Amino acid sequence: MTTAAAAPSNFLIWPKINADDLRHVQDPCVILEAEWKDSDGVTCYAFTVGGWLNGNALGNGAGSGVTIGGDVAIVHADSREEAKLIAAYGLLDTIAALTGEEKAYQEAHAALARLQSVNPQRRIDLAAAAPADKSDDFQADTEAIRKLRGDDIVLTVGGVEGGPEGAPH
């Protein structure tokens, strides 16, 4: 266990994985790496991640885990048990969020493929049409691809007020 004097350890030199790897960790767990008092006298705990990735144990083999891109979980708590519980739930929530994000991107790419299978002029006509004239599937697909903005996707919407003079509204 790290003492208060050594608490600001350089976790950048710790073994690390990235967020995508984290989604694939089997038996994920948190490993307490350090405990110290912060400048306000509150006890802080630093946690890394343990488990298995591609059949290999995470960490250095001496009871330490890995960081996520050099980051550790810092928890303020009244006890080690409370800190470990907070860190463990945080890890599970993070993995669930990353998995949900990946599924949303997969759904967005599937929606994009469906939209690209429609004639481009028909897509523009549907995008500019009143909501009552659009199919539920078209509306769901256009909403799903919003996640891909910035990935060379241009969304076309109708009814925009205050556009350039002469532009269709």
Image (tube, helix red, strand yellow):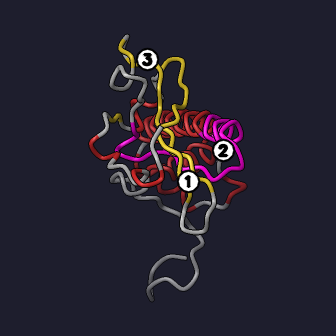
Task: Name the secondary structure under disc 1.
Answer: helix
Whether residue 169 sits left or right of residue 79 in the image: it is left
Numbered range of the magenta stretch: 67-90
Please tell me which residue lies in front, 158 or 32.
Answer: 32
Numbered label attached to residue 52: 3
Mark closer to the observer (3, 1): 3
Check disc 2 and give the amino acid type: Ser
Mark 2, Cα crowd under 10 Å, few <14 / some 14-19 / many 20+, is few
Give the residue displayed 30% in from the left and 47% down from the top.
12
The spot of residue 112 in percent (x, y) is 45, 41
Label 2 and label 1: CA atoms lie apart by 9 Å
Which comes sooner in the sequence, label 2 or label 3? 3
Task: Decide: is 56 above or below 13.
Answer: above
Q: Which residue is mark 2?
A: 135
Please state which of residues 55 and 65 is positioned toward the viewer in this rendering. 65
> Reading the chain from its start, which is encountered first: label 3 or label 1?
3
Tell me the quadrant of the picture where the C terminus can be found: bottom right
